Amino acid sequence: MKHTVAIPAFADNYIWLMPAAQSNVVIVDPGDERPVLSYLNANHLTPFAIIVTHHCHDHVDGIKPILAQYDIPVYGPATERIPGMTHPVKQGDLVTIDSATQLQVLDVPGHTAGHVAYYQPGTPGQLFCGDTLFSAGCGRLHTRLYDDMFKSLQKIAALPDDTLIYCAHEYTLANLQFAAHLAPDNSDIQAKIAQTRSMRVAGKITLPSSLGDEKKINPFLRCHTAEITAAATRYATDNGLQPPSSAAAAFRIIRDWKDRF
């Protein structure tokens, strides 16, 4: 296998298979073992390791059934309970895939308190970010840790623009509809909506996205812009809230707005 592959699961999850040396692959966030094992068997692939971004059931429930068939390491966030975890990881750790590939661990709390992401530098690089960053959106804050989530997104935004974003859900079109509501005159968002609709009609997935594209269309990466600040101010004024005085405050407002959209 030469390229990272998406394995659809549940209604809208993607379990990613990242190629390693020879016929080995790394499994990312296996919430359901059945499509993973089926794909491995059909394509004569062997799992090298499992990497996990956070503890939500749709990311971890397939781990133990996979381990029943394969004796492989499980990497996951050090502060969360991950089934079968053998290698707890945190910011700055390296996950060695093979002699040519290492994944850098980033702490990206917000969706959950211990959420991590895995970044492979390269041209382009790859980021497996679970439910922290989506195409045109970001994860719900189960933790209510707004400042942590804002900082996590800023950490991701500092990566190279050509970084490919391998998030865990097909939420792109719904996220774009919210983005367009905030910025109805944004031509980049309108073009992305047209492209996304065409892809979904054709049965294609909309991922991975690129970080450079996300900086154009994703309101949660654009809280510093006049466009998003104005939208957050309108919402705050209409709902008796304090208008945002910073990008972090604008993030808090539009994240709550998205929950009610």
Image: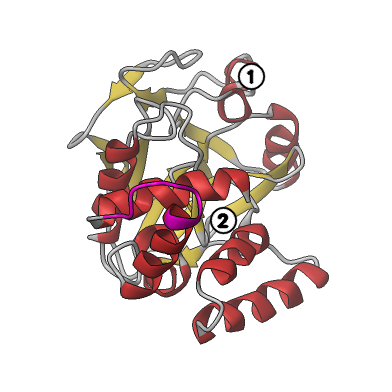
Which badge, 1 or 2, is on the more N-terminal residue?
2
Q: Position of residue 245 (x, y in %)?
A: 23, 55
Residue type beneath disc 1: Gln
Q: Is residue 239 magenta?
A: yes
Q: Position of residue 261 (x, y in %)?
A: 63, 51
Q: Which residues are magenta?
A: 237-244
> Left or right of 69: which side holds 138?
left
The image quarter containing residue 194 is bottom right
Binning the other alpha carbons within 10 Å of mark 2 as few (below 14), some (14 to 19) or many (20 upward) gives some
Element marked by disc 1 = loop
Question: Does any portion of residue 233 appear in the rendered image?
Answer: yes
The image quarter containing residue 75 is top left
Q: Residue at x 50, y 42 (%)?
A: 24
Question: Does any portion of residue 22 appear in the rendered image?
Answer: no
> Left or right of 204: which side holds 25?
left
Residue under numbered circle 1: 69
Q: Nearer the viewer, residue 49 or 227?
A: 227
Q: Nearer the viewer, residue 99 or 78?
A: 78
Residue type beneath disc 2: Met
Q: Is residue 103 magenta?
A: no
